[in-house]
Image (tube, rainbow, N blue to C red):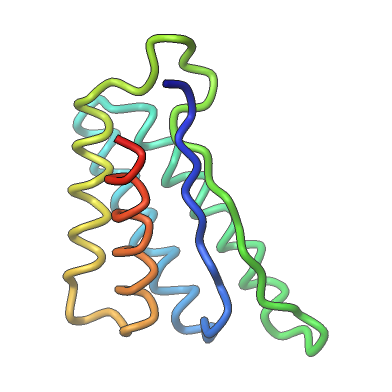
């Protein structure tokens, strides 16, 4: 197995939701870095970067909500994503999805990515 593609639908995301998910991605990326899981950290860095771009365009009246695809483990090779990386990513997405301080839109998006990861395993 090579890269795992996870889709995220940003329709229905207010600017506050984008900011909250971006902060969550930043925190989870830091957590992955501390756990010495660079592939998981890279996933959250990519998510954070995409959300930063969305935030810059959020004020634009012509902004179209879009669906994005994040690739987890791209470039790892034939061996695929290590199970420890998949477990940590799933745990991080569960933490975001279960965080009642986040809006329902953010929790649902995080849970959806977690479900997609489970289905890919």
Q: Residue furthest bottom?
A: 61
Q: Where is residue 43 in the image (x, y as percent from the top left)?
A: 44, 41
From this view, report whether residue 16 is shown above or below residue 71: below
**Residue at the right extreme of this rendering:** 62
The quarter of the picture where residue 65 lies is bottom right
Image height of 21 relative to 70, above or below: below
Residue 67 at what x, y percent from top left? Answer: 62, 64
Is 111 drawn above or below residue 88 in the view shown? below
At which x and y percent is residue 23?
Answer: 38, 64
In the picture, the quarter occupied by the C terminus is top left
Outermost top residue: 78
Q: Residue at x 57, y 52 (%)?
A: 49
Q: Residue at x 22, y 25 (%)?
A: 83
Residue 82 at x, y = what percent? Answer: 28, 20
- Quick check: 58 left or right of 107? right
- What is the count of numbered marks? 0
As drawn, is 16 to the left or to the right of 103? right
Q: In the current view of this chain or complex, which residue is farthest to the front?
A: 119
Q: Which quarter of the figure has residue 29? A: top left
Q: Which of 68 and 31 is in front in this view?
A: 68
In the image, what residue occupies the spot 56% across and 72% down? 10
Q: Is residue 79 left or right of residue 62?
A: left
Q: In this view, does 1 lie to the left or right of 67?
A: left
Residue 56 to residue 16: above or below: above
Which residue is drawn at the image coordinates 27% and 45% (left, top)? 118
Quarter of the picture holding the N terminus: top left
Using the image as rendered, state which of residue 120 and residue 48 is in the foreground: 120
Q: In front here: 32 or 68?
A: 68
């Amino acid at each position: 197995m090579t890269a795992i593609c996870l889709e995220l639908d940003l329709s229905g995301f207010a600017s506050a939701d984008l900011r909250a998910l971006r902060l969550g991605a930043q925190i989870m990326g830091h957590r992955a870095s501390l756990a010495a899981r660079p592939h998981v950290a890279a996933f959250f860095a990519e998510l954070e970067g995409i959300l930063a771009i969305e935030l810059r365009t959020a004020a634009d009246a012509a902004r179209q909500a879009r669906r994005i695809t994040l690739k987890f483990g791209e470039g790892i090779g034939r061996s695929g994503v290590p199970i420890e990386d998949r477990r940590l990513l799933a745990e991080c997405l569960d933490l975001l999805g279960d965080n009642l301080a986040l809006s329902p839109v953010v929790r649902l998006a995080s849970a959806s990515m977690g479900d997609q990861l489970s289905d890919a395993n």
